[in-house]
Image (cartoon, rainbow, N blue to C red):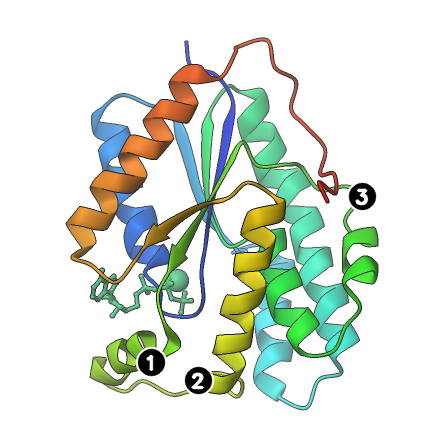
Amino acid sequence: MGKPFFCVLEGIDGSGKGTQLWLMERRMRKEGFEILATREPTQTLTGYFLKIVLKMGDIHPLTDCFLFAADRAEHVDKLILPALNENKVVLCERYLFSSIAYQTMKGVDETLIRSMHEFALMPDLTILIDVSPEVTMKRKEQVLHYEGEKFENVEFLTGVRKKYHELARRHHMVIVDGDRDEMVVHEEIWRIFKERYDAKSVQTDIARFVDEE
Ligand SMILES: Nc1ncnc2c1ncn2[C@@H]1O[C@H](COP(=O)(O)OP(=O)(O)OP(=O)(O)O)[C@@H](O)[C@H]1O
Ligand SMILES: [Mg+2]
């Protein structure tokens, strides 16, 4: 029988989170892990609602914040916690740290964001896939029909990346250099995951999010 393990992949737009989530999901299924692979915004009704609102543009930063927090509350309650209670590994693309990294760049107070997330669970492992915005922009330009989003610019993403680095120090994230071949990145993420997963005690409770400052 497996044990509950909550693993989050973070990074700026286009850093390779989705690619690595898919590679991890495929590898884990092959190795017999029971897993939930999921992402934020979610594919629940609140996630769809959030995406529609985001597309409208000209949204107050606080509205963004509340909607992401609402979607996350549904995510934790309906998907993440039930999967952990079934001793599954949860692999999640973006989580609370995305809100902190992006929303503080839009001027929202970090303490306020944290206080909205009393319900949140603490990941067992957060991996920050670190790539410069210059590289991610080039990647995205190569994709046909790519439509840039409002805040996807180098200056903004440089700020987000800096904030991610600060959060990585405070919350013991593991930083992985994402500017390498995707299979090389995958091997490193897999090794880090396995090490942490094997070391985790079965008895450990599912932890609530705490500020580790
Ligand atoms: N290691 C890599 N080297 C080069 N290109 C990559 C690498 N990883 C992913 N890509 C490419 O970069 C683009 C963005 O990757 P992906 O969708 O996985 O990023 P993401 O972090 O999930 O982005 P988003 O924040 O938009 O969800 C894709 O076209 C993908 O094929
Ligand atoms: Mg993605």
Q: Position of residue 120 (x, y in %)?
A: 71, 42
In whole angstroms, how far apart are the C-alphas of marks 3 and 1?
Answer: 35 Å
Residue 177, x across and y down, in percent: 31, 55
Q: Nearer the viewer, mark 3 or mark 1?
A: 1
- SS state under label 2: helix
The quadrant in which the N terminus is found is top left
Residue position for label 2: 154
For image coordinates 52% across by 11% down, the residue present is 201
Mark 3 or mark 2, earlier in chain: 3
Q: Which residue is mark 3?
A: 118
Q: How many numbered markers are drawn? A: 3
- Label 3 sits on what residue type? Glu
Check disc 1 and report its element: helix, strand or loop. Answer: helix
Which kind of residue does numbered mark 2 sit on?
Answer: Val
Task: Report how far apart the C-alphas of labels 2 and 1 lie in the structure.
Answer: 6 Å
Please give left or right for residue 78 compared with residue 145 in the image: right
In primary-sequence order, the first of circles 2 and 1 is 1
Residue identified by numbered label 1: 134
Query: Quick check: 151 left or right of 30?
Result: right
Mark 3 or 2, closer to the camera? 2
Identity of the residue drawn at 32% across and 74% down: 136
Quadrant assignment for ligand 1:
bottom left
Residue contact between numbered discs 2 and 1, judged by CB atoms under 8 Å: yes
The part of the image, by quadrant, that contains residue 194 is top left
Give the mark, 3 or 1, whose residue is nearer the N terminus.
Answer: 3
Residue type, mark 1 in image: Glu
Q: Residue 124: image x %, image y %? A: 54, 31
- Badge 1, how many Cα within 10 Å: few under 14, some, many 20+? few
Between marks 3 and 2, how big is the CA–CA gap? 32 Å
